[in-house]
Image (cartoon, rainbow, N blue to C red):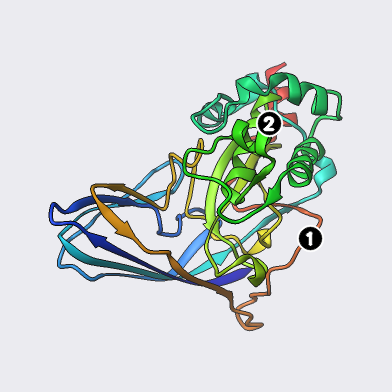
């Protein structure tokens, strides 16, 4: 088990008209991600509304900020219980066998224009053996062809833009990998978390974007930017792309300051917690969606 201590501080200056916010900074609540402790502090005397999506576990906080300074601080202790699997034993799932709640992740979306990448994806990955190894090949291809460069993209940069420019930040790596997976009929979703394990040379700790692909019988974690240690990723939200799970969506005239974050692991033999590390196993913090593909196919024949 992995135990992560998390601290997030956000600071905004609100104009005289006030502003509405939708935050996605709470750690998601899933069967494999248990919140041991959490605390939310808001500098203004306002009461937020917090909603948990029953399928994804995403937690969204909505509030109306008053003019002046707004400080939002969130702290949590999160236990991660990973599912480990042999990559060689994980098959792709035909569209006809996908669970209904997974189907939405095979279509193009705003930032992941998989319909524009069909030929490229077919040429590069169409003849590869199907399964987890093909998703890993897509991850490795994106990692090789895109250079991680801070401040190299904007909130409007899409997967196609990243493919053309060949530079980006974690968000751009994730969008391109998601689009390429969908182009070969592998469901993939955009996931937000923390950049645990990132090299300090890349800058201060920050929010992180990575990918979860649906193969076998669950969503498996991939980090195409290669900047974090996947075993230490705390999930905030999952969606079709960044539009679904921005850490802050703002409606109004607001001056935003850079987020301040910390995430560290707690190693305690008495609790059975260990330090996150790179490994060759397939990793998932997602619950099983039902029968493994091989069993489902046998039962449907």
Q: Nearer the viewer, residue 3 or 156?
A: 156
x and y, in percent, of residue 137 in the image: 80, 39
| Disc on the earlier residue, 2 or 1 | 2
Q: How many marks?
A: 2
Say which residue label 1 marks.
279
176 left or right of 75 in image = right
Using the rendered view, name the quadrant where residue 272 is placed.
bottom right
Quadrant of the frame with the N terminus: bottom right
Q: Using the numbered discs, state the Cα–Cα distance from disc 2 to disc 1 in whole angstroms.
A: 24 Å
x and y, in percent, of residue 3 in the image: 57, 72
Note whether 66 is above or below 135 in the view shown: below
64 left or right of 216 in image = left
x and y, in percent, of residue 175 in the image: 59, 39
Q: Does the rendering let one see residue 286?
A: no
Q: Nearer the viewer, residue 257 or 43?
A: 257
Residue 180 numbered mark, or none = 2
Q: Nearer the viewer, residue 152 or 242?
A: 152
x and y, in percent, of residue 138 in the image: 76, 37
Residue 88 numbered mark, or none = none
Q: Nearer the viewer, residue 298 or 273?
A: 273
61 left or right of 152 in image = left
Note whether 237 is above or below 264 in the view shown: above
Q: SS at mark 1? A: loop
Q: Which residue corresponds to the image point at 67% horizontal and 33% vertical from the top-left?
A: 164
292 left or right of 287 in image = right
Q: Which residue corresponds to the image point at 64% horizontal and 19% vertical from the top-left?
A: 96
Q: SS at mark 2? A: helix
Q: Which residue corresponds to the image point at 37% horizontal and 64% vertical from the top-left?
A: 257
Quadrant of the frame with the C terminus: top right
Q: Does the rendering let one see residue 72?
A: yes
């Amino acid at each position: 088990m992995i135990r992560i201590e998390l601290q997030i501080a956000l600071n905004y200056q609100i104009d005289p008209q006030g502003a509405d916010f939708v935050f996605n900074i709470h750690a998601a609540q899933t069967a494999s991600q248990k919140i041991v402790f959490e605390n939310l502090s808001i500098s203004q005397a306002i009461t937020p509304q917090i909603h948990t999506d029953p399928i994804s576990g995403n937690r969204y906080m909505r509030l109306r900020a008053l003019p002046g300074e707004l400080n939002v601080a969130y702290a949590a202790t999160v236990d991660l219980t990973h599912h480990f699997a042999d990559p060689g034993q994980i098959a792709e799932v035909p569209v006809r066998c996908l669970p209904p709640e997974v189907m939405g992740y095979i279509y193009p979306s705003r930032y992941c224009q998989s319909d524009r990448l069909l030929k490229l994806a077919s040429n590069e990955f169409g003849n590869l053996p199907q399964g987890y190894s093909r998703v890993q090949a897509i991850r490795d291809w994106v990692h090789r062809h895109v250079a991680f460069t801070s401040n190299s993209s904007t909130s409007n940069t899409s997967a196609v833009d990243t493919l053309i420019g060949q530079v980006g930040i974690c968000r751009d790596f994730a969008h391109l990998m998601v689009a390429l997976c969908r182009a070969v009929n592998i469901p993939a979703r955009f996931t937000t978390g923390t950049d645990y394990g990132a090299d300090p040379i890349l800058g201060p700790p920050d929010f992180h974007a990575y990918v979860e692909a649906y193969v076998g019988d669950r969503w498996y974690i991939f980090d195409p930017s290669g900047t974090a240690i996947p075993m230490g990723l705390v999930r905030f939200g999952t969606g079709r792309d960044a539009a679904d799970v921005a850490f802050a969506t703002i409606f109004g005239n607001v001056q935003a300051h850079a987020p301040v974050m910390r995430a560290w692991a707690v190693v305690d033999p008495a609790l059975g917690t260990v330090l996150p590390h790179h490994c060759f196993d397939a990793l998932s913090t997602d619950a099983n969606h039902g029968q493994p593909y091989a069993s489902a196919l046998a039962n449907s024949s």
